Amino acid sequence: MTREGPTSEVTAFDGSVEIVLPESPTTGYRWELEGENDRARVAGSLFEEIRSAERLAGGGGMRIFRLDLFGTEPLRLSFGLRRQWDPEPIERRAVVVMFAD
């Protein structure tokens, strides 16, 4: 069963946007952009570990997607948190992209 996470809204400037989602890749679960979309292309993705005084091995962090966008109409994107071998994600997050004037 897939859990529906919160929906976020972000504003895109100059045809690109960054989407940030919490992730613990050592669990095997990673975020990915779902579905085909001719208006958004992943230009890059990186994982940034959360730094703390109690830095724990295998700790969590943030997955940062940089997307190139095409068009100016609002866009709804879906991200799924899944292991590479699982057909269904354990969680989905929707992100609505608005474009700056």
Image: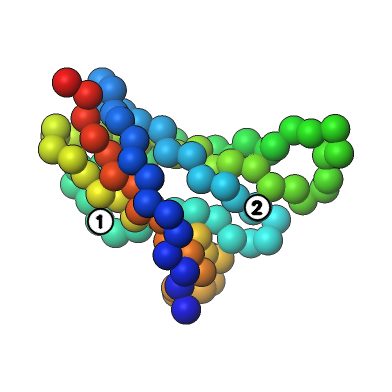
- Name the residue beneath numbered marker 1: 36
Answer with mark 1 or mark 2, whichever residue precedes in sequence: 2
For the residue pair 72 and 85, the one nearer the viewer reads as 72
Q: Is the residue 17 above or below the residue 87 in the image?
A: above
Residue 61 spot, x, y in % from top left: 65, 42
* Callout 1: SS: loop
Q: Residue placed at 37% from the left, 51% from the top?
A: 7
Q: What's the amino acid at mark 1?
A: Glu
The answer to which of 94 and 89 lies nearer the viewer is 94
Give how far apart the Cα atoms at labels 1 and 2 are.
25 Å
Q: Position of residue 23 (x, y in %)?
A: 60, 50
Q: Secondary structure at mark 2?
A: loop
Quadrant where the C terminus is found in the figure: top left
Q: Are marks 1 and 2 in contact (CB under 8 Å)?
A: no
Residue 5: x and y, percent? Answer: 45, 59
Question: Which label sits in the foreground, 1 or 2?
Answer: 2
Q: Between 8 and 84, which is closer to the camera in this rendering?
A: 8
Q: Residues within 10 Å of mark 2 (few under 14, many from 20)?
A: some
Q: Is residue 32 visible?
A: yes
**At label 2, which amino acid type do we have?**
Ser
